Image: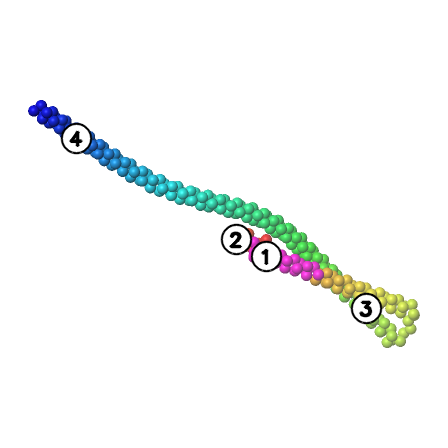
Amino acid sequence: MELSSAFEERVRQMEDARNHCMTRLQAEKEILAAKSRLLAAKVAAARRLERRRLLLERRAADLASRALAARAAIDATHARRLAVARDISSTNGEIEEAQRKAEEWDRFYESKRKEMEEFRAMSQQFEAGTRQEVQRLKASVSQLQAALQELQSSGLRSDDAGIGAAEARKADLMAKKAKLDETLAQARQFRALLRQQLQKAFASQRACSQERCWGGSIVCRSSGDCRV
């Protein structure tokens, strides 16, 4: 009887130990399940963080690429600005040089115009005086020729000295007439030469103006015409 009671007590203790182990195992299983769920949540969070990190890295790379492109554009714009500034400076220098040359041309034309006017007035006066002198010499020669013819036709005796003086006067008048004709021809030739030089100067100035209008478009556009 006592053996049976001890056996039952032992069986009960074993049952209690088994139940305690089962409870403990169930609790551990639940703890492991909770840890697994927590670990899965952490893994999911880590994956989300990894995806976010990759996204941020791609955004950072895109921003860096945009920054490099913007920097290149800024550098190109700065280079263009410097080039435009150099062009403007060069154009201003060309404009100043063109204005200086234009002033020189204006002074040259004004001086040549005054010289031409003075020469025209002098040549007209000289030509008028020369014509009067030529007419006077022609009248004198005509008078001498008429006197000689009258002497020859009348048959009157003339001394050799008088005839020689008349011939010498005639020769002197003819020489003066020839010299005046030569001087008048030289004056006309000089006037034609001066006119030709002025025409060449005008032609050179027009060619220079056309060349600047064709080759210096900035100057032409800024000024509105093709003046040098």
Callout 1: SS: helix
**Looking at the picture, does residue 112 appear above or below residue 29?**
below
Q: Amino acid at mark 4?
A: Arg
Q: Quadrant of residue 38?
A: top left
Labelled disc at residue 40: none
Q: Does the residue at mark 2 contact the one at mark 1 (Cβ under 8 Å)?
A: no
Q: Is residue 216 magenta?
A: yes
- Among the two numbered marks 1 and 4 on one chain, the one whose residue lies closer to the N terminus: 4
Bounds of the magenta span?
Answer: 193-217
Residue at mark 2 = 221
Q: Are marks 2 and 4 in contact (CB under 8 Å)?
A: no
Residue at the extreme left of the image, as rendered:
1
Find disc 1 in the rendering and name its residue: 211
Q: Is residue 133 above or below residue 34?
A: below
**Disc 1 to disc 4: CB gap under 8 Å:** no
Position in image of residue 226 (x %, y %): 56, 55
At 91% across and 68% down in the image, what residue appears?
A: 161
Tell which tag, 3 or 1, sits nearer the viewer.
1
How far apart marks 3 and 4 lie (CA) works out to: 175 Å
Q: Secondary structure at mark 3?
A: helix
Q: Nearer the viewer, residue 223 or 154?
A: 223
Q: Which residue is mark 4?
A: 18
